[in-house]
Amino acid sequence: MDSFTRGVRNAFRNYIRTTSVVIILAISIGLALIMLISLFAVNDRIDSVRASVGTTITVAPAGIRGFQGGGELLTESDADTVSSLDHVASVEQSFTSRLTTDTDTTLQSAIDPGSFGQQNSGSSGQSGGAQMSPPPGASGMGGATMTLPVMVNGVQDNASLQSLGMDKLDIVSGEGLASTTEDNVALVGSQLATKNNLQPGSTFTAFDTQIKVVGIFDSGNQFSNSSLLMPIDTLRKLASSEGQINSMVVTADSSANVQAVTDSIKSEMGSKVDVVSQLDATSQALSSLEGVKSITRYSLAGALISASVILFLIMLMIVRERRQEIGVLKAIGASNVKIMKQFISESLTFTLMSAVVGTVLGFAFSNPVLNILINSSSSQTTQVAQGAFRGGPQGGPPGGGAPPGAGGPGRQVVSASQSALENLNAVLDYRLLVYGLMAALLIAVIGSSIPAWTIARIRPAEAMSGE
Amino acid sequence: MIKADGLVKEFMTASGSVKAVDDIDMQVEDGKFVALVGESGSGKSTLLSLLGALSKPNAGSFLVDDTDITRLNDHDLIRYRRDSVGFVFQNYSLVPNLSALENVMLPMEFSGMPREERKKRAAELLSQVGLDGDKQARKPARLSGGEQQRVGIARALANHPRLILADEPTGNLDSKTGQNIITLLRELSRSENTTIVAATHDLSIEEQCDRIYRIRDGKFIDNGDDAA
Ligand SMILES: Nc1ncnc2c1ncn2[C@@H]1O[C@H](COP(=O)(O)OP(=O)(O)O)[C@@H](O)[C@H]1O
Ligand SMILES: [Mg+2]
């Protein structure tokens, strides 16, 4: 029997009061826990949206997308300017060209134009941007035998999938491209290879030049599998476009710096370029999440404060009620510290019992509450996110049955934003228990600090009062 | 020996200041049993609280074995209350959710005695005041008034005090029970050579004590020199 166990026993001196205190405190603590759980779920989701966005920023010449629009291409010196900016980890240049019969290729496109390709052929023919060339002898509009151009991407490093709009790049046979080579070599998409009967070692003609196939790749989507990869310098030389860049993919040193890098590229390069980070498209989803986060933060603080205030008032009431008893304890030799310990242990007992009940309540209600918190913003955000990616930054040439932006990073980001608010589930996390325990201790300490001060001021002579 | 000199305790009230204890001198030999007798409001409790260092006097000194209690710092005051004084209250003032045994163990806990030791001594003390067996494990509410006061006396004796201060210890008891309590205190003061100062208006206490101080309006009107 010491101050501590006396405090625990004192917590049960009045069962009705103990029960009411525990119920009221448990509701506050449960609410705090729900908010904590929500905060964690939302934080995790913000992280995963950020992570899905990645650290890349696409810089394209203003007014040019793929082979549409007009203006000046970027140059290698622009790439140097961008690489010297703060927080830029790397700059990946890309140069894209098309192989049509005009440039004298032996390759046949692996993509069937379909009705989409036909449509685009008709409409864009008038706008001056020749999208595809009917093969010799084709009957023009509505011709069933028209073919599509073959895309050639000049790459510095064949691992840079983002710039190519690919999910993955598997070398299914042969080998990859050496990043520094200027040889006349190519990595051929698996569908294009099948269509043209190419294997590693075979050759084909493009730009009036013999090109050697070093490997076959599979990117996971038909559009890319119908294209070629060539070393960027080789392609620029063959296309007589030395030093030019269609676009560059800038990688920031962390996803937190994507915004800063985007801003500094914009201010450095001005209106000459369009700068698109996937952050722009997810910012709606992120801002909804941030909104939910701040609601949960305030509610968490509110719940903790109200729990502390409740406990504080109860402890004050108990201390006042036991003034004479405290006086007696002092009269028979108890120090202030011993009596305070006893009361702190009593308030800890209340808090811990309430924390147990509150935890049960919190876990029982965290998912429903989380759903209510996020429901209204969810559908709205998804629409915005999808809208932003219609024809995303990597939307290559329309046609060939591949919808604009298909296979590009846009698709991933839309789905990430979509699920950002849906399926936001509360998860049990050891951190929760640690924080919960810390919060309970904090509540107990705050709740008993002022009553403890009252205890110190009670005079031992109070023992005599009422006699 | 205890010796009070010119003790004054003044309270500020709405209707002005009240000298509850007004220039009190008293001197009691060790092992004596003295009574403070006076009407309600005469200042008995206030004087006891000064002697027990429950409050500080506005003037005067109180020597216990040559130590002036009125000059002790807070830390030493706690030790004085804990080790040198045993308090017995009119309404017993036991902690209601502790058993008789646990109540008696309290002062020993405050003085740092090991648990087993204080449990043993508490049981002995309770037997000594006449509470045996299962009554020691009972909460105060399940004991009679006389039994509760016995627990109160056992608690007061726990740390071998040299001075017991009893504020109307029989005030809530019938005369026969009160008589027994007085006899108990009397015997203890003899066997342990403990000084006892008891406030009372119980005639039977007066009969048994070594000396009677009569108090009115905070002043002694008779310091019992004849009886000493
Ligand atoms: N804390 C206090 N504040 C103000 N007046 C007090 C206080 N305690 C006692 N008194 C006054 O001091 C006088 C003596 O009181 P007390 O010592 O309790 O008398 P007794 O114990 O003999 O009945 C009374 O007039 C009482 O009203
Ligand atoms: Mg009194």
Image (cartoon, rainbow, N blue to C red):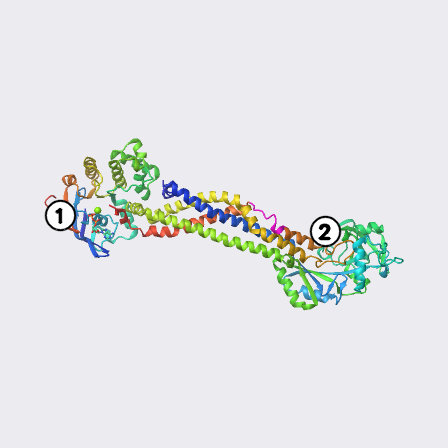
**Crowding near pointer 1: few (<14 within 10 Å), some, many (20+)?**
some
Q: Could you say which is closer to the camera, residue B219 or residue A300?
A: A300
In this view, the residue farthest toward the top is B133
Q: Quadrant of the C terminus of chain A?
A: top left
Q: Could you say which is closer to the camera, residue B185 or residue A111?
A: A111
Q: Could you say which is closer to the camera, residue B35 or residue B84?
A: B35
What amino acid is found at the position of numbered circle 2 in the picture?
A: Lys
Q: Taking B144 as reference, is A347 above or below it?
A: below
Give the extent of the magenta segment. A419-427
Q: Judge left or right: residue A370 versus residue A12.
A: right
Q: Judge left or right: residue A108 versus residue B178.
A: right
Q: x and y percent of residue A206 in the render?
A: 84, 58
C-alpha separation, residue under disc 1 versus residue under disc 2: 107 Å
Q: Taking B115 as reference, is A371 above or below it?
A: below
Residue A32 magenta: no
Residue A422 magenta: yes
What residue does disc 2 label?
A168
Query: Given the image, what chain letter belongs to the residue carrying mark 2?
Result: A
Query: Given the image, what chain letter belongs to the residue carrying mark 1?
Result: B
Dominant secondary structure of the magenta stretch?
loop
CB under 8 Å between callouts 1 and 2? no
